[in-house]
Image: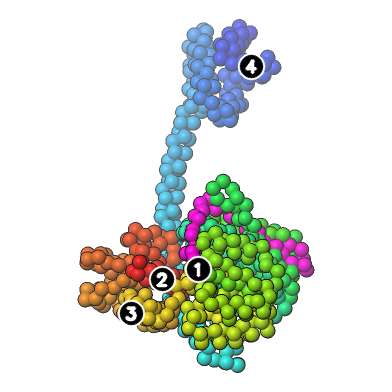
Amino acid sequence: MQLNTYRRTQVRQIIGKGFKIPQRVFDTLLDEFNAFLVEDDRTFLYNVHYILYQKKNMEMTRKTLQSIVDTFVFLYEDASKEEERQKVKKQFDLLFDMLFIQRCFYSKKIEERAKTAQKILLHTTERLSETIETQELMIANISHEMRTSLNAIYGYLRIIDENNTLSGEEHQFLQKANSATLALKSLVNDILNVTKLNSGQLEIQKEYFWIDEMLMQCIDHIALEMKKKKKITLLTDIPFLPVQVYGDKAHIMEILVNLLSNAVKYTDEGTIRLEVIFKKQGKGYDVGFSVEDTGIGMTPEQIKTVFSPYSRFRTERQGLGLGLHIANELAKKLAGKLCVESTFGKGSRFELDIAFNEIKSSIVQVKDKHFCFFIDKLIHLSYRSRLEFLEKNGAKVYVFEKETEFINFLLTSGKTIPDMVFVTTGEEGYAKFDALIYYLRTLPIYKKTVFIAENIQQHLSLNFFDEVYEYYAPVTVYNKLLTVVNDENKNEEQNISLLVIDDTEMNLEIFKLFALKRFPNIRIDLAGGGYEGIGMFKIKKYDLVFLDLKMPGLNGFDVLMKLKKLDDIPPVYAFSADIYKSNIEKIEEYGFAGMIEKPLQPEKLFKIIEEVINAKNT
């Protein structure tokens, strides 16, 4: 059957009802349709099929189907011979099969393939989850073993160092061992942090804390590294913020310690400057931390990859090149921003911006206390703000800049005996005042006074100061040191009992050594496993329990469940090397009072014990 003039006109009218097609395009379409009817040329079929596939429009597909059916109905009815009708029917079946039946068939196959792909993807995901869980379990086990060993090495070395029993070359060997231990500890932490970040196991733990205290702790972390670099000076510009902020102190410290450590590592001489800027924002503060050095600096190409993992620019320096990558990822997790500016050969500057939306105005317990300060240099603005803070909280503050006036006050103060004395001077001055304190200690009126040397920035042998700070003492130290009283009261204050449960003898010994060094009058019982610990708990009353989580037989979680069945259990703290998010969540779920990481952090341990002592004596 051929499209004559009449049929072309009718087909044009039928198709024109559903589509507006330009004359030229329509003529070409009719020519291809005629070739399909007469010569079985399938160009028409392919073109229509392509257009429908490309458009993917249900309404267009419906109109196309309607136009094709109406066109073939007209051609079938217009045919004068049976042979022509059969030809029309055959061509219609062919067109309908290609445009619609085959598309349905292909769609079905695609659907089946999609289901197959979904099954494969689900299976792959399950296998990947199993692999990740196995990896986490393996790393958790390795972490536990490495941190347990590190706990012993770090603990014994620190105790030997604090006992001051070694001198000369032996003391140098001890310092090198300490340095190597800290490097190994940092390496283990870097590997674990990367694993936690990649697996989503990083736990954000917020708390209220003092920024100045945190920064002093950061400086303490790099003290050993600084002592090796005799030609480096650390400068600080830390304004005093008289409120506590709410944030993830541990991870912010980790970022800042990394930046400071890198500054020391890549600076052979010159200065490292630690600065802080506070900006009031709503109910909280935006805080900018910066670490600037005069070290080797970086090229523009190196700056582009500085936050990439395993990025190192001087291979002779220690480390894997993970530190800045971890610091940047932690900053993102804390909704902060870490950026860098650097000039090759001149130095680098890293800036960390963190928003603290919650603050707490904490009152330092210094009312009616007397504070005496000797500062033979110009008082820094941040230091002056500390003095104002003390006065605002009810303290009486005396400040001296002349040595004779200061000494005269101490020797003739009469009834106005200072509770705390702070000294900031030069090397000869510290030695002179150390001798003066030795004399003052012989006077009964100075038995309870606390003497503190600040901003010494060098290693000096001071024997009679109670505390020595390379920079300035945090305000929290005021509260802590004011609790120091005579031995009779101390015995009464420290009348608490501790139970420590751990299956590793070295962990128990390290724990006991540290605790008794700070609190010599507390009572500590040690249990070598879960069953032994439960037995001891049943026959004796304890004020505080520390419990290792990973033990053979009964693990820490099982032990806690059994203890809870007994009457009136005290605070129980988990003691663990597994610091994954899932484990921390489990610790909270089981009702532990908190957690102490391995290697043991003595400062955190002391803080917990102090809280229990204070709670019992109030």
Q: Report which residue position mark 4 lands on.
A: 21
Q: Is residue 309 visible?
A: no
Tell me the tag on residue 610: 2
Marks 3 and 2, how far apart in space?
14 Å
Q: Who is closer to the viewer here, 130 or 492?
A: 492
Q: Is mark 3 on a helix, strand or loop?
A: strand
Amino acid on which the number 1 mark rests in the picture? Lys
Q: Is residue 597 above or below residue 101?
A: below
Marks 1 and 3, how far apart in space?
32 Å
Tell me: 574 left or right of 339. left
Q: Report which residue position mark 3 lands on.
A: 523
Q: Is mark 1 on a helix, strand or loop?
A: loop
Residues drawn in magenta? 342-368
Marks 1 and 2, how far apart in space?
21 Å
Mark nearer the viewer, 4 or 1 = 1
* N-term-proximal mark, 4 vs 1: 4
Q: Report which residue position mark 1 lands on.
A: 369
